[in-house]
Image (cartoon, coloured by chain):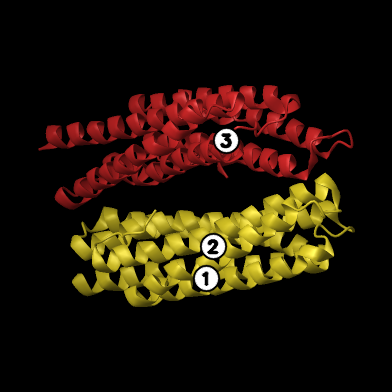
Chain colours: A red, B yellow
Amino acid sequence: MRAAYTEKIADLSFSLATMCRQADAAMASATQALLQADLAIAEKVISDHDELDAMRASCEEKAFALLALQAPVAGDLRSVVSGIQAVNDLDRMGRLALHVAKITRRRHPKQALPEEVKAYFAEMGRVAAHLAKGAAEVLENHDAEQALQLLDEDDAMDDLHRHLFSVLMDREWKHGVAAAVDVTLLGRYYERFADHSVEVARKVIYLVTGKIPEDAV
Amino acid sequence: MRAAYTEKIADLSFSLATMCRQADAAMASATQALLQADLAIAEKVISDHDELDAMRASCEEKAFALLALQAPVAGDLRSVVSGIQAVNDLDRMGRLALHVAKITRRRHPKQALPEEVKAYFAEMGRVAAHLAKGAAEVLENHDAEQALQLLDEDDAMDDLHRHLFSVLMDREWKHGVAAAVDVTLLGRYYERFADHSVEVARKVIYLVTGKIPEDAV
C-alpha cells in the first residue's frame, strides 16, 4: 500500500516535470518566433497549447485521486498539495508563452520588436529557459538546495526587465507608442514566466522542508 | 465528527470570502488613489497588503489541516482542493491592487493617467469591484448558478480593455511613451484582477457540481 502510494507520488512529480518542460519548450519556440517574426513557429505554439491543457487536467486528476483514494500524511500530503499549487503556475507559464506567440502572429509580417530591444528579449528568453529547466528538475528530484538557488537566479530577469523599461522611457525611443505597448506587455510576460518558475521552486522547498522560504513573497 | 467537519469547511469558505472582500477593498482604494493621484490612499493599500499575506497563510493552514486531520471524501474533498486553488487567485488579486497603488506612488505628485483614459479606469474599477464582490458571495453561499453568471460578466472588462488599447494605439495619442507604458500595465492589472475573480467563480462551480465549466480556460 505504502509502496504504491510512493509510486503514485513519483508519477505525479514526473507529470508535473513533464508539463514544466512542455511550457519551457513553448516559451523557447515563442521566443524564436518573436525574434525572427516567424509565423509558422508562432502558429505551432498556439496550436500545441491544447497539450498543456490536457497535461494540466491529468496532473489535477492524479493529485485528486491521491487525496481521495488514500489519505496521505505529513510529507506525502505536502507533496500533493504543493503539486496542486504548482500545476497552476505551470498552466500560467504555458499561457504566457501563448501570449508571446499571439503578439508575434498579430504583428506578422511586421516584427513586433524594434531591433533595439531584440537583444533584451533574446536574453530574457535565455533566463526564462534556464529557470523553467531548473523548475522541471527540482519538480522531479525534490532537491531543496537546488530549488533555493533558483530563487536568486530570478534577479537576472528583474534586471533585464528594469533595463528594458529604461530603454522604453528614454526620450530617444523612436518606435512610437504601438511598439512600446507591445514591448511593455512582452516584457511583463517574460517576467511573469520567470516568477512562476521561481514559485514552482518555492513549492518544492515547502514540500521537502515543510517551510515556506523567507523571502517567499 | 461529521458535523465538526462541515463546520470547518464552512469556516474555510468564510475565510476565503473575507480574503476576497479584502482584495476587493484593496482594488477599490487603489482605483481611487489612481484616479485622484492620492498618495495617502496608495500608501495605505501598500501597507495593508501584509494583512492579505496573513489571510493567505491562514486559509492555506485551514485547508491543510482539513486534509491532514480528517480524510475528506467527494464533495468535501472538492471544497478543500478548490479552496487551495482559489486562495492563489485571491492572493494574485491582492497583488494586482498593490501594483496599481505602486504605480500611483511612483508617479506622484503627477497623475499616472492622462485625463483622456480616466473614465476607462473608473469603469474598469467598477467592473472589477462587481466581479470581486460576486466572487466573495459565491465563495460563501456556494451558489453555482450565481457563479455561472459571473463567467459572462467578465466580458465587460475585456471590452473595456480592448477599447483602451485602441485609444493607446491611436495616432492621436499625445501623452508620450512613458504614459502609454503605465496605461498598458494598469490595463493589464485590471484585466487580470477580473480574470482571477472569474477563476474563483469557476472553482466554486467545480466544488458544487464536480465539473469544470466548458468555456473554462
What is the spatial separation of the Cα atoms under label 3 and label 1, in whole angstroms?
31 Å
Residue B190 found in image quarter = bottom right
Q: In this view, does A140 lie to the left or right of A25?
A: left
Q: Where is residue A187 in the image (x, y as percent from the top left)?
A: 65, 37
Residue located beneath label 1 in the image: B131
Instruction: Say if labels 3 and 1 share a chain.
Output: no
In this orientation, which residue lies closer to the viewer: A182 or B128? A182
Q: Position of residue B82 (x, y in %)?
A: 34, 59
In this orientation, which residue lies closer to the viewer: A215 or A55? A55
Q: Residue at x 42, y 59 (%)?
A: B86
What is the spatial separation of the Cα atoms under label 2 and label 3, in whole angstroms?
25 Å
In this orientation, which residue lies closer to the viewer: A164 or B25? A164
In this orientation, which residue lies closer to the viewer: A98 or A162? A98
Q: Which chain carries label 1?
A: B
- The kind of residue tagged 1 is Leu
Q: In this view, does B65 lie to the left or right of A40?
A: left
Callouts 1 and 2 close, C-beta under 8 Å: yes
